[in-house]
C-alpha cells in the first residue's frame, strides 16, 4: 500500500480535488500552495463557490510536467490493480455517499481482496477503506462539460506512462475496456 501523507480539506469547502492534487505533489516533492492549486483546478459556478473538474486537474498536472491522463473504465478494481502494478497514482471521482449526486475526489492508496484504501480529504484520518462492491456504485460520470463518460479516473505518474501499452494491458482482461482522453489539455476554461 502506498504511503501518502493525508491532508484534510476545510469543512464546507469544495476543494477535495485540489487537496488530492496537493497530497500527490507533496509525495513527488513538488511545492505548491493549496489555494493556488484550487484556483487552477476549479471553476466558479456561484459567487465564491466552485468545484474541481477533471479536465482542469489534468491541465494543471500536465503543466507541472507530470504524466497524466483521464480514463474511463468499466472494471475499476482490475484497472486499479494494473495502476498499482505499474506505480501509477490514481485520483478517483466518486459520489460522497450512495444517495449523493455530487462528486468527491479521493486519492487511491491500495487495495486488498475486499477493500480499496483512499486518502479522503473530507475525513480526519487517511487510509479510509471502501468496500469494492460499494466503490462500483459510487463511481460517477465525469464532470467534463464536453464529455460525459461514466467511471472516470485521473492517472498520474512522475515517470512516462505509455498510454497505448496501458490500454493494451487493461483490455487483456475480460470485460475490462478503458477509454483514454488524451487531448483534454486543449479544452480551455471559458
Image (spheres, helix red, strand yellow):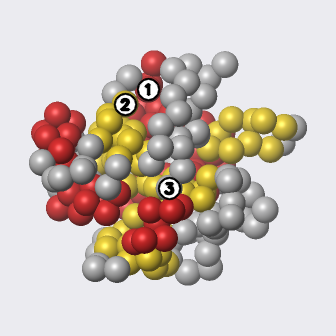
Marks 1 and 3: CB-CB under 8 Å?
no
| Disc 2 versus disc 1: nearer the observer | 2
Residue named by callout 1: 184
Of the 4 image quadrants, the one containing the N terminus is bottom left
Query: Based on the displayed image, in which of its 4 quarters is residue 113 positioned?
Result: bottom left
Which residue corresponds to the image point at 53% horizontal and 44% vertical from the top-left?
141
Residue named by callout 2: 181
Q: Secondary structure at mark 3?
A: loop
Task: Report the disc number at residue 17.
Answer: none
Query: Based on the displayed image, in which of its 4 quarters is residue 27 positioned?
Result: bottom left
Q: Residue 52, how many percent across, how many down?
A: 62, 44
As displayed, is residue 17 above or below residue 117? above
As displayed, is residue 138 above or below residue 6? above
Which of 92 and 123 lies nearest the eye of the viewer?
92
Q: Is residue 3 visible?
A: no
Marks 2 and 1: CB-CB under 8 Å?
yes
In three-dimensional space, the C-alpha distance between marks 3 and 2, rounded to whole angstroms, equals: 17 Å
Which residue is most to the right? Answer: 47
Which residue corresponds to the image point at 38% horizontal and 42% vertical from the top-left?
72
Q: Residue 121, how many percent across, how many down?
A: 59, 66
Which one is earlier in the sequence, the residue at label 3 or at label 2? 3
Residue named by callout 3: 139
| Disc 3 versus disc 2: nearer the observer | 3
Which one is earlier in the sequence, the residue at label 1 or at label 3? 3
Q: Residue 75, how many percent across, how many down?
A: 32, 55
| Disc 1 versus disc 3: nearer the observer | 3
In three-dimensional space, the C-alpha distance between marks 1 and 3, rounded to whole angstroms, equals: 20 Å
Of the 4 image quadrants, the one containing the C terminus is top right
Q: Secondary structure at mark 1?
A: helix
Q: Is residue 73 left or right of residue 86?
A: right
As displayed, is residue 190 above or below residue 13? above
Amino acid at each position: 500500500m502506498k504511503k501518502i501523507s493525508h491532508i484534510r480539506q476545510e469543512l464546507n469547502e469544495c476543494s477535495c480535488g485540489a487537496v488530492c492534487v496537493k497530497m500527490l505533489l507533496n509525495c513527488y516533492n513538488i511545492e505548491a500552495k493549496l489555494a493556488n492549486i484550487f484556483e487552477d483546478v476549479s471553476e466558479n459556478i456561484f459567487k465564491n463557490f466552485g468545484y474541481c473538474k477533471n479536465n482542469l486537474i489534468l491541465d494543471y498536472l500536465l503543466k507541472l510536467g507530470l504524466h497524466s491522463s483521464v480514463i474511463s473504465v468499466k472494471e475499476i478494481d482490475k484497472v486499479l490493480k494494473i495502476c498499482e502494478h505499474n506505480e501509477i497514482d490514481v485520483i478517483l471521482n466518486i459520489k460522497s455517499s450512495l444517495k449523493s449526486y455530487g462528486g468527491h475526489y479521493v486519492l487511491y492508496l491500495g487495495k486488498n481482496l475486499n477493500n480499496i484504501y483512499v486518502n479522503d480529504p473530507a475525513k480526519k484520518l487517511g487510509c479510509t477503506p471502501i468496500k469494492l462492491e460499494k466503490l462500483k456504485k459510487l463511481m460517477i460520470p465525469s464532470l467534463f462539460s464536453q464529455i460525459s463518460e461514466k467511471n472516470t479516473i485521473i492517472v498520474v505518474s512522475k515517470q512516462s506512462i505509455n498510454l497505448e501499452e496501458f490500454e493494451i494491458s487493461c483490455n487483456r482482461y475480460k470485460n475490462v475496456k478503458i477509454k483514454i482522453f488524451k487531448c483534454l489539455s486543449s479544452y480551455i476554461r471559458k
